[in-house]
Image (cartoon, rainbow, N blue to C red):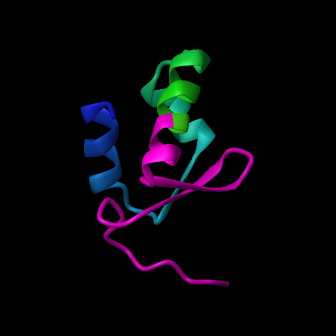
Amino acid sequence: MDTTLAQLLLSWERPFIRDQDLAVLFQNRSSKRYDVVKHAIRKGILIHLRRGLYLIAPPYNQKKCDSF
């Protein structure tokens, strides 16, 4: 996984991350963004909730997620 994504997830203030947030990080290079997201999902770092919304899995997520 890209170290910039790991650093971003460790310092992220919410327990989830949106596709639009990642677009800024990858400067709207969709193919690179999708490749990194797919890799992170396979490794268990991100959990796909719905289109464009991902839950950050521990240990990268330091905050508790409310189920509501």
Highlighted range, magenta: 39-68
The quadrant holding residue 5 is top left
- Name which residue lies at 67% across and 84% down: 68
With 18 as the anchor, is 58 left or right in this view? Answer: left
- Name which residue lies at 68% across and 44% down: 52
Considering every residue shown, the one lying at the far front of the view is: 42
- Residue 47: horizontal and vertical position, in percent? 56, 57
Q: Toward the viewer: 1 or 42?
A: 42
> Compared to 11, does 28 lie above or below?
above
For residue 47: magenta? yes
- Residue 66: horizontal and vertical position, in percent? 56, 83
Q: Toward the viewer: 13 or 49?
A: 49
Q: Toward the viewer: 39 or 14?
A: 39
- Residue 1: horizontal and vertical position, in percent? 33, 34
For residue 10: magenta? no
> Compared to 67, does 54 lie above or below?
above
> Compared to 58, does 48 lie above or below?
above
> Compared to 1, does 46 lie above or below?
below
Considering every residue shown, the one lying at the far right of the view is: 51
The quadrant holding residue 59 is bottom left
Q: Toward the viewer: 52 or 44?
A: 44
- Name which residue lies at 38% across and 61% down: 13
- Name which residue lies at 52% across and 37% down: 37
The quadrant holding residue 12 is bottom left
Picture mark count: 0
